[in-house]
Amino acid sequence: MPKIVSARVIVTSPGRNFVTLKIECDDGTTGVGDATLNGRELAVASYLADHVVPCLIGRDAHRIEDIWQYLYKGAYWRRGPVTMTSIAAVDMALWDIKGKVAGLPVYQLLGGASREGCMVYGHANGTTIGDTVAAALDYQRQGYRAIRLQCGVPGMASTYGVSGDKYFYEPADADLPTENIWSTARYLRVVPELFAAAREALGWDVHLLHDVHHRLTPIEAARLGKDLEPYRPFWIEDATPAEDQEAFRLIRQHTTTPLAVGEIFSSVWDCKALIENRLIDYIRATVLHAGGITHMRQIASLADLHQVRTGCHGATDLSPVTMAAALHLGLAIPNFGIQEYMRHTPETDAVFPHAYRFADGMLHPGEAPGLGVDIDEALAANHPYARAYLPVNRLEDGTMWSW
């Protein structure tokens, strides 16, 4: 059995910051895991290097479940994004090793493929409704079956989720948080107009999605969902701050628009009530921030019992290692719904060579043993860490609001 002889933490910034854990076994087999926590990367790097890596040396790399339980239960201070991201990095790396030793892609170890590929959605955004619709038409021409729509809010100097770069948008934009001004009333007026224009231009054979970014109260979110019903959105995402799971009951009572939430969740306990009470339709927790493939599979299994599908977060704050892991899991589980796909920059792709591929609106993880992704450490060393934060928002009167 392969024994872990080393584990090192690699921090690099090929266009944005990533933290990667690389585990090596006594037979020379290596595995990689993503440990990136947007805006708090060094906290995870320290947790891994100072508290986790010493506990891994000498362990049997095949004992994935046992190591997961050891790192989760043995820490006493359980859960939270730093702890669960660290555990996820170890978990991904161990699944990568197991696949390489077996000579099989990870999805085969999870029971084999349940579908031909994982449907993904791209991000169409623009300062105006016209710009966004034009970007969406471009995605449609590329073969995307699902497209997220975001446009600028009239009268606002900037809007989170909207960028001048149509393909390689990075929202962490400064070494101290940018402060934006937000108007809920203006936002609620423009989004239905955006969807009306998009349906007119794109037709009804493409899925349309929208991200609220936690910025509405439950009743405001209910109003938005009701206003969008004629345009049959695939979902509205993060309609209200997700810490209050019961808030989604009020939204559900007022709209049939599907609801998605969970990219900031770190364990099954964050979404247990939402799933069991059928208050959401898609769970967006990630392999990276929710404890790795091992724990995300448990979340997906609970969701499957309640007819909730996965719709995992897949922005550029997740490295290609997480994208690969998400695709292996998504290909295997019965209740996969959709996968977010924000393209990484060429610099990032060079640092993280990978086997997954896009075709016909879907991603496939490929047939390489393990996760099918690695890190070029020589290239990574050319991109030093650069502190970067996500922006924060204030209402027009100066009140702090959600990001």
Image (cartoon, helix red, strand yellow):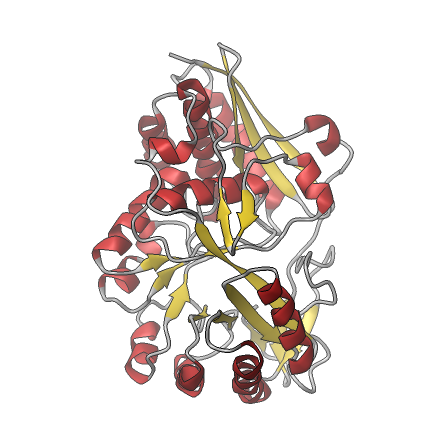
Asked if one can make out residue 14 in the rendered structure from this viewpoint, the answer is no
Q: Residue at x 42, y 71 (%)?
A: 235
Q: Please provide percent x and percent y for residue 293.
A: 39, 39
294 on left or right of 343: left
Q: Please provide percent x and percent y for residue 196.
A: 53, 85
Specify the farthest residue to the right. Answer: 382
Q: Please provide percent x and percent y for residue 375.
A: 63, 31
- The quarter of the rendered structure image containing the C terminus is bottom right
The answer to whether residue 265 is above or below residue 192 is above
Asked if one can make out residue 3 in the rendered structure from this viewpoint, the answer is yes
Q: Nearer the viewer, residue 213 or 178?
A: 213
Q: Residue at x 52, y 44 (%)?
A: 323
The answer to whether residue 231 is above or below residue 16 is below
The answer to whether residue 326 is above or below residue 226 is above
Q: Which of the 4 image quarters holds residue 91? A: top left
Q: Which of the 4 image quarters holds residue 294? A: top left
Q: Please provide percent x and percent y for residue 128.
A: 68, 81
Q: Nearer the viewer, residue 197 or 266?
A: 197
Q: Which of the 4 image quarters holds residue 178? A: bottom right
- The quarter of the rendered structure image containing the N terminus is top left
153 on left or right of 184: right
Q: Nearer the viewer, residue 100 or 297?
A: 100
